[in-house]
């Protein structure tokens, strides 16, 4: 026998209406949202590092200004998402503790290095491209604050994706060395960006329930497919080769057939053993410690302002 609360919740979901912070919701729904939204927020914050690495070395003042704005956008997305998670009853401090203690997950993709300027292009084109594929459907997520946050985030992501494409396009119109640099970066980021969509559907423990709750609208494999379909014509325009000799269009299914993804590598990265996991966490920890005085000053300022308004 369902309670009135449960019935109302099921009805809202069935009718494509939104669940808002003060509505009743099942504990498991709340938990899964806290999990996904906080991981998403952490990804944005850790995701600032691979590109932050190139701000001081961008090849022109204009490129530097664009890259700085992009990295700042990511900080904004992170804060936006932390706020959305807070509406579910977890505090910012708890989430930060989970991140810097190494307990929280964040996207696998940000544990790869960025050795050349072309990696800025490949991240924008591939990583932000994958993020858009994954996040546009999340604009319709059943939880109101998450869905609404995604609308704005996606607008900024599509700008990020174009700036990455444009970096690669410029390099591909340059010298042989520049072309090679662009191709090498695409080779580095292509497979990790496919893995970013998460494990294959038969190894994705959360998908089925998240689809029922209309948090996720498509499975990991469905979104990966969509992404490859989007990349192929863009790779042609760029003149880069997608590094998958088995990639082919299947006329019967109307879908691309993708080569084997290295899932062992993916799960190793999730276990903390990717090329940059330790470095990324260490940097975040240091930044958090070095920012302690800012948080203290802000809290003290808020305390004094509150006293003033009382007086
Ligand atoms: N990196 C790290 N962990 C991952 C990744 C990944 N690329 N993909 C899946 N996982 C984790 C899941 O978090 C889950 O772990 P948990 O149960 O301990 O939380 C486990 O692997 C199994 O995966 P799924 O059952 O498929 O998990 P889920 O249904 O949550 O789907 C997905 C994973 C697709 C990433 C989903 O959480 C999602 O859409 N999140 C929002 C988007 C996001 O976080 N993007 C971050 C990168 S984009 C950017 O920041 C620019």
Image: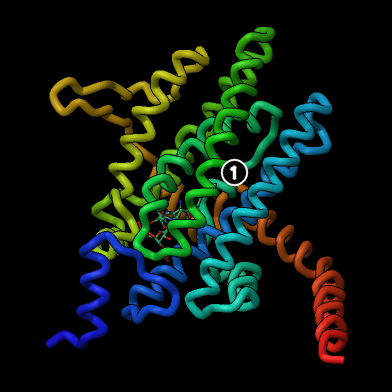
Residue toward you, 268 or 251 = 251
Q: Is residue 272 visible?
A: yes
Q: Describe the colour scheme in one phrase.
A: rainbow
- Residue 168 found in image quarter: top right
- State whether residue 249 is above or below residue 292: above
- State whether residue 28 is above or below residue 311: above
Looking at the image, residue 32 sits to the left or right of residue 78; the answer is: left
The percent position of residue 14, horizontal first and vertical second, equals: 21, 64
- Most extreme residue toward the bottom is 311
**Total number of numbered labels?**
1
Residue toward you, 260 or 37 = 37
Looking at the image, residue 255 sits to the left or right of residue 224; the answer is: left
The percent position of residue 183, horizontal first and vertical second, equals: 56, 20
Q: Quadrant of the N terminus?
A: bottom left
| Residue occupying the point 69% across, 34% down | 115
Q: Is residue 205 visible?
A: no
The percent position of residue 37, horizontal first and vertical second, equals: 48, 63
For the residue labelled by badge 1, is the local secondary structure a helix, a strand or a loop? loop
What residue is shown with label 1?
112
Looking at the image, residue 233 sits to the left or right of residue 253; the answer is: right
Q: Quadrant of the C terminus?
A: bottom right
The percent position of residue 39, horizontal first and vertical second, equals: 51, 62
| Residue occupying the point 67% across, 15% down | 178
- State whether residue 7 is above or below residue 150: below
State yes or no: Cβ of the residue under disc 1 lies below 8 Å from any atom of ligand 1.
no
The image quadrant in which ligand 1 is located: bottom left
| Residue occupying the point 79% across, 27% down | 62
| Residue occupying the point 72% across, 41% down | 69
Category of crowding for the residue at label 1, using alpha-carbon neighbours closer than 10 angstroms: few (below 14), some (14–19), many (at least 20): some
């Amino acid at each position: 026998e369902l309670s009135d609360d449960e019935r109302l919740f099921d009805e809202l979901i069935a009718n494509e209406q939104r669940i808002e912070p003060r509505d009743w919701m099942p504990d498991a729904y709340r938990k899964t949202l806290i999990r996904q939204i906080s991981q998403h927020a952490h990804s944005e914050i850790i995701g600032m590092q691979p590109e932050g690495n190139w701000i001081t070395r961008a090849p022109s003042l204009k490129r530097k200004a664009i890259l700085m704005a992009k990295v700042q956008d990511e900080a904004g997305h992170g804060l936006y998402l932390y706020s959305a998670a807070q509406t579910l009853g977890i505090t910012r401090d708890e989430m930060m503790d989970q991140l810097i203690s190494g307990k929280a997950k964040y996207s696998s993709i940000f544990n790869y290095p960025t050795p050349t300027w072309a990696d800025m292009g490949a991240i924008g084109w591939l990583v932000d491209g994958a993020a858009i594929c994954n996040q546009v459907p999340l604009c319709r997520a059943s939880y109101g604050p998450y869905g609404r946050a995604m609308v704005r985030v996606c607008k900024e992501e599509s700008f990020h994706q174009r700036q990455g494409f444009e970096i690669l396009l410029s390099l591909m119109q340059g010298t042989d060395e520049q072309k090679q640099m662009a191709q090498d970066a695409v080779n580095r980021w292509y497979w990790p960006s496919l893995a970013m969509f998460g494990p294959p559907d038969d190894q994705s423990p959360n998908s089925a329930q998240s689809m029922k709750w209309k948090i996720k609208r498509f499975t990991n494999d469905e979104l990966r497919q969509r992404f490859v379909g989007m990349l192929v014509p863009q790779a042609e325009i760029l003149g880069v080769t997608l590094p998958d000799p088995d990639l082919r269009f299947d006329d019967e299914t109307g879908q691309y057939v993708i080569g084997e993804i290295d899932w062992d590598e993916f799960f190793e990265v999730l276990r903390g053993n990717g090329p940059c996991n330790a470095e990324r966490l260490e940097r975040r920890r240091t930044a958090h410690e070095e920012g302690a005085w800012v948080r203290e000053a802000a809290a003290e300022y808020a305390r004094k302002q509150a006293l003033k308004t009382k007086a």
